[in-house]
Amino acid sequence: MRISEVAEKVGVPVSTVRYYERIGLLAAPARTPSGYRAYDDGSATRLLFLTRARKLGLTCDQILELLPVWDGTHCSTTHEEVARLIDGKLAEIAARIEELSTFAAQLESVRQDLAAAPPPQACRDDLSCCVPSAPGCFVPLTALTTLTTLTARVS
């Protein structure tokens, strides 16, 4: 099979096949007399494995670690190694979910503060709004429209 055929068969771009060859995940295939890459079914099977491993979230470095096991003859060893890598990915995902949940709660808190705030005159560093009469809220003199407001701010 030519590179375009093996890429289409597995469902990846040709550039991915070339990249996997360049970094050592996929062995360089034989060449035809005219210089085209000639892939066999084994290359297509390996490329399919690489594609599935990437979809599981494994990095190319993790896949490189896994390949000697996958190339071996004992399926149980491959399963154990893949399970170990997946457990690591699940732990990473759980940590990321926790970070995102915390961030979402912070955003919700800011959103609630914004909904409860009076119309903005100026914003603080925490994005909460200031009104001229609020203590600790510094409003530029250009934002003050009346002498009464100015007097209230000074006193």
Image (cartoon, rainbow, N blue to C red):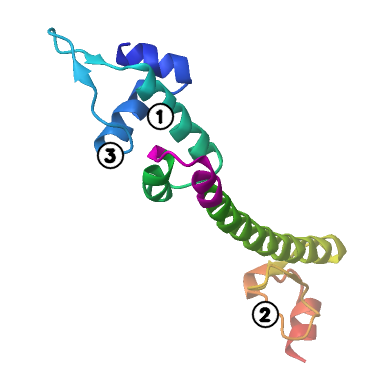
Q: Which residue is mark 2?
A: 138
Q: Amino acid at mark 3?
A: Gly
Q: Alpha-carbon distance for marks 1 and 2? A: 65 Å
Q: Position of residue 112 (x, y in %)?
A: 83, 63
Q: Amino acid at mark 2?
A: Phe
Q: Which residue is mark 1?
A: 46
Query: Where are the magenta residues, as a range?
Result: 71-81
Q: Alpha-carbon distance for marks 2 and 3? A: 61 Å
* 137 lies above or below 103: below
Q: Residue furthest left?
A: 33
Q: Position of residue 72 (x, y in %)?
A: 40, 41
* 24 lies above or below 18: below
Q: Which residue is mark 3?
A: 24
**Left or right side of 107 for 41:** left
Q: Are marks 2 and 3 in contact (CB under 8 Å)?
A: no
Magenta span includes 75: yes
* Circle 1 Cα neighbour tier, 10 Å, few/some/many (<14 / 14–19 / ≥20): some
Q: Residue furthest bottom?
A: 155
